[in-house]
Image (spheres, helix red, strand yellow):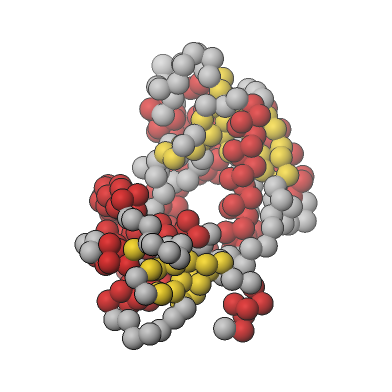
């Protein structure tokens, strides 16, 4: 008896490896958009979960950003139900404008909706369909931001209840799996819109694959794995260093001398932690921001305050480094 199509087998194995830690009866939810990656993921979960004594469902997030998005969401949900997934839920995401860009705002809203659904349904895991190609694109975007090892380390296979089983698989595998199932996945028109940075990164990656060889994207993804290990270790040291920083006497802030005494590889990460604590979106704090902040210690000539994303002012006053939220109108005129 012939086995499953090789692409189908690869997607099932990838999902199986991430279900082993669950207990009998646990629920895993697939985040399904109707695209090839998430459809292949839904099919693999529908096959593997019952064989492991688990339940598999799906959640389809409707961002409401395109005409007919509700119809696309309903069709994706119907496909998931036909696969045997249960429960299957369509949820509307509230995409608010933060100034970080539509991609980032939609992502924030999507993850909030997925997390809220998982809590309501009591799900142990949320399965995401990101592939090795997505990982390579993420690394290219990190290079464009110049934000250091963490930005270049890409997406983790797991963070909290979010799991990405397909990070080692190329997108070609999920497309082939859908073809083997006889399913025509939805094509997101945003994937052709070059106003989005990720679309431009995807096309650049394709060009680089042609110029440098078909293994370029896979090499980027492997580099991300290696850098993530280094970044995780350094950030654990930075978190401990932040916890150990003494509060400055008098004005709220951190002690300047204690911060300056940290090794630079740790101190640059502590700057990011301090900015995030003050309310700055950590993904928007670039290497240039960190360099400017570090100059408050290493080459201070009375400059300041400096500004970081989130309308945060950072200043040096005597022996103190302090972060302060400033009014939007003031930030715009400073």
The residue sitting at the front extreme is 250
Q: Which residue is rendered at x = 55% and y = 40% of the image?
A: 38
Does the image show residue 26?
yes
Task: Residue 59: give x, y in percent of width and height.
Answer: 64, 35
Q: Quadrant of the N terminus?
A: top left
Task: Residue 306: give x, y in percent of width and height.
Answer: 46, 77
The residue lying toward the viewer, choosing from 224 and 207, is 224
Q: Quadrant of the C terminus?
A: bottom right
- Say whether residue 64 is left or right of residue 210: right
The residue lying toward the viewer, choosing from 28 and 111, is 111
Q: Which residue is rendered at x = 36% and y = 42% of the image?
A: 168
Task: Residue 218: give x, y in percent of width and height.
Answer: 32, 52
The residue lying toward the viewer, choosing from 215 and 160, is 160
Task: Residue 99: give x, y in percent of width and height.
Answer: 62, 67
Does the image show residue 202?
no
Above or below residue 165? Residue 85 is above
Above or below residue 49? Residue 115 is below
Count every numbered label the image shows and give the total. 0
- Say whether residue 87 is left or right of residue 48: right
Above or below residue 265? Residue 124 is above
Q: Which residue is rendered at x = 38% and y = 57% of the image?
A: 247
Where is residue 4, by image quadrant? top left
The residue lying toward the viewer, choosing from 86 and 159, is 159
Q: Which residue is rendered at x = 61% and y = 44% of the image?
A: 112
Where is residue 184, by image quadrant? top right
Above or below residue 256? Residue 300 is below
């Amino acid at each position: 008896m012939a086995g499953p199509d090789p692409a189908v087998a690869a997607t099932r194995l990838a999902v199986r490896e991430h279900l082993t830690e669950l207990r009998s009866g646990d629920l895993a939810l697939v985040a399904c958009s109707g695209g090839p990656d998430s459809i292949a993921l839904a099919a693999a979960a529908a096959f593997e979960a019952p064989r492991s004594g688990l339940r598999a469902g799906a959640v389809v997030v409707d961002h409401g950003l395109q005409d007919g998005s509700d119809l696309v969401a309903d069709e994706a949900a119907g496909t998931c139900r036909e696969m045997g997934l249960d429960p299957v839920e369509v949820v509307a995401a509230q995409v608010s404008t933060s100034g970080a860009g539509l991609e980032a705002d939609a992502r924030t809203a999507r993850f909030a909706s997925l997390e809220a659904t998982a809590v309501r349904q009591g799900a142990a895991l949320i399965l995401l369909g990101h592939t090795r190609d997505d990982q390579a694109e993420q690394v290219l975007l990190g290079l464009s931001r110049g934000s250091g090892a963490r930005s270049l380390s890409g997406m983790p296979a797991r963070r909290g209840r979010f799991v990405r089983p397909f990070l080692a698989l190329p997108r070609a595998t999920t497309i082939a799996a859908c073809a083997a199932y006889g399913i025509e996945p939805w094509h997101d028109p945003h994937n052709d819109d070059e106003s989005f940075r990720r679309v431009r990164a995807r096309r650049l990656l394709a060009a680089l694959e042609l110029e440098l060889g078909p293994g370029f994207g896979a090499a980027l993804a492997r580099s991300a794995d290696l850098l993530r290990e280094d970044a995780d270790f350094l950030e654990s040291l930075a978190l401990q260093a932040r916890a150990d920083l003494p509060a400055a006497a008098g004005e709220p802030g951190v002690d300047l001398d204690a911060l300056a005494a940290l090794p630079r590889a740790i101190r640059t990460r502590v700057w990011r932690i301090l900015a995030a604590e003050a309310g700055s979106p950590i993904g928007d704090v670039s290497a240039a921001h960190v360099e400017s902040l570090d100059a408050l210690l290493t080459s201070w000539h009375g400059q300041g305050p400096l500004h970081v994303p989130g309308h945060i002012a950072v200043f040096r006053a005597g022996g103190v480094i302090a972060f302060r939220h400033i009014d939007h109108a003031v930030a715009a005129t400073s």
